[in-house]
């Protein structure tokens, strides 16, 4: 399986929710995004675990999911409310049910959120941004 196919599968999964007006694999500055909420997926690295000679590699792809929301422009609602809903949606996708793993439609062994989610709620200017680290365990890469 290729890295591009795997990252495309992540984006397809996120788009399946209907929660995003704009999406892509190329990160766009929020000031240039015409319609929000928006989501972007970036492949930022690979981790190869140590292995014995002749054994196939255990590869974990490291990706970032960037989310933009302008809900903070409504002075009647806390800026984090809409972003929290989007984060809950993404978390539910990557943790479908107890004992079940997200395989991106059989593309990978497992995909999950791992690490700190950075959240900028938009208190000052109304623009909320979140960066979600997503790890993807791959059986093999081409």
Image (cartoon, rainbow, N blue to C red):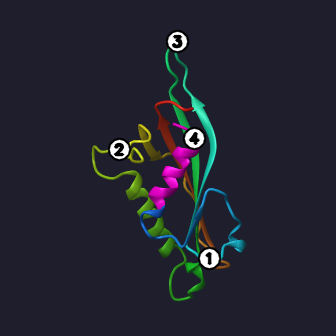
Q: CA distance from mark 2 to mark 4?
A: 19 Å
Task: Kindly identify the residue that appears in the image at 67 percent across and 59 percent down.
Answer: 27
Q: In terms of secondary structure, where does tag 1 sit?
A: loop
Q: CA distance from mark 1 to mark 2?
A: 35 Å
Q: CA distance from mark 2 to mark 3?
A: 28 Å
| Residue 11 visible in image | yes
From the viewer's perspective, tell me whether residue 92 is left or right of residue 19: left
**What label sits on residue 123 in the rendered view?**
1
Label 1: how many residues lie within 10 Å, few (<14), some (14-19) or many (20+)? some
Magenta stretch, overall SS: helix
Q: Return the residue nearer the eye: 6 or 68.
A: 6
Residue 66, position in %: x, y?
Answer: 59, 60
Q: In terms of secondary structure, where does tag 4 sit?
A: helix
**What label sits on residue 54 in the rendered view?**
3
Q: Which residues are magenta?
A: 1-14
The residue identified by callout 4 is 3
Residue 31, position in %: x, y?
Answer: 72, 73
**What label sits on residue 101 in the rendered view?**
2
Residue extending farthest to the left is: 98
User: Who comes first in sequence, dot 1 or dot 2?
Assistant: 2
């Amino acid at each position: 399986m290729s890295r591009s196919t795997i990252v495309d599968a992540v984006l397809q999964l996120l788009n399946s929710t209907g929660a995003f007006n704009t999406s892509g694999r190329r990160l766009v500055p929020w000031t240039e995004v015409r319609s929000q909420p928006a989501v972007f997926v970036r492949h930022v690295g690979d981790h190869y675990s140590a292995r014995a000679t002749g054994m196939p590699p255990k590869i974990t792809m490291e990706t970032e999911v960037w989310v933009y929301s302008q809900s903070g422009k409504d002075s009647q609602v806390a800026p984090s409310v809409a972003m929290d809903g989007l984060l809950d949606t993404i978390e539910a996708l990557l943790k479908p049910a107890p004992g079940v793993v997200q395989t991106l439609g059989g593309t990978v062994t497992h995909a999950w959120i791992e690490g700190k989610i950075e959240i900028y709620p938009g208190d000052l200017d109304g623009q909320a941004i979140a960066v979600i680290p997503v790890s993807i365990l791959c059986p093999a890469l081409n």
